Image (tube, grey):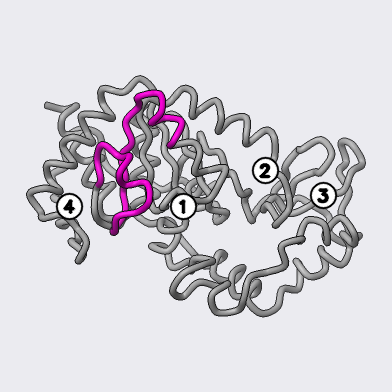
Amino acid sequence: MRVAGFLSRGKSSTPLPAPCIFVAAMPADDLDSALQRAADAIRAARYVGALTGAGLSVESGIPPFRGPGGLWTKHGEPPLNGFEEFLRDPKAAWQARLNPQGPMRELWETLRAAAPNEGHRALAALERLGLLRILITQNIDDLHRVAGSVAIAEIHGNYTLVRCLGCGIRHHRDDVDLHELPPICRACGEILKSDTVSFGEPIPFDVLEVCQQAARDCDCMIVAGTSATVYPAAHFPLQVRERGGTLIEVNPYPSEITPLCEVSLRGPAGVVLPHLVQLIEQRRGA
């Protein structure tokens, strides 16, 4: 696994570029104040988690599924019974996966070419600092792991992995023999499927259990690049807030979750989060 470096420990001698201010963004002074409050909340918290979504991937050039420029906006949404279709004919589903056409071909090619942005690296830096305990992501692009994050719960799966529908074991796709389709798990003999969660497919129990435990443990959660409206992921920040925890939003524009957040950092995660990490490091070194 390629691990990307980020900020040195202690004070940085190279100033970061000023955060971008959008039409819906707060004035610069307010952003500075919000960064201070976010840094204080993270440093004071007992257990910090993060929830990330499509907005973070967009900053790495990966189109969203919905909204302007979204794959489904351009090509139409895929069938809502994708998991049922996989179970009905797993060989055909695997053949379509290995020879994608249309929007799926566009998606896989984009995923393979994508690289982590500074937002991914900032979250990995927070983990290395011992502050970020768990990162829940709705993204399937593997960029958090490539950036260096370790404690990751990928609620919608990971496009580089293959998962057994029986025992739940995961393999990297390059380690799976695809000469015979569908591939079979060597451990239990059940069918292997792409780890990405299809329409109609339950969230894998092991991932869901980690997320639910994290929501119970968190007293501070960073919500970055997502409006947190798609369930079950949307439920986790709500749980944190209901228990009196602090929510820190990182998003260029207000979202449905904004009224619940104690701190809203207006700007792209790839710009705002590095400033937050640098501020935390400076305070540690003071």
Q: CA distance from mark 1 to mark 4?
A: 24 Å
Check disc 3 and report its element: helix, strand or loop.
strand
Check disc 1 and report its element: helix, strand or loop.
loop
Q: Badge 4, how many Cα within 10 Å: few under 14, some, many 20+?
A: few
- Residue 16's tag is 4
Q: Are marks 3 and 4 in contact (CB under 8 Å)?
A: no
Q: Residue at x 13, y 50 (%)?
A: 15
Check disc 4 and report its element: helix, strand or loop.
loop
The residue identified by callout 1 is 53
Q: Nearer the viewer, mark 4 or mark 2?
A: 2
Residue 209 placement (x, y as % from top left): 62, 30
Q: Mark 2 or 3 closer to N-term? A: 3
The residue identified by callout 3 is 192
Residue 119 falls within the magenta-colored stretch: no
Q: CA distance from mark 1 to mark 2?
A: 16 Å
Q: Nearer the viewer, mark 3 or mark 1?
A: 1
Q: Residue at x 35, y 29 (%)?
A: 220
The kind of residue tagged 1 is Gly
> In the image shown, does 227 or 163 lie closer to the viewer?
227
The residue identified by callout 2 is 203
Q: Mark 1 or 4 closer to N-term? A: 4
The kind of residue tagged 3 is Leu
- 233 displayed left or right of 277: right
Which stretch is magenta?
238-264
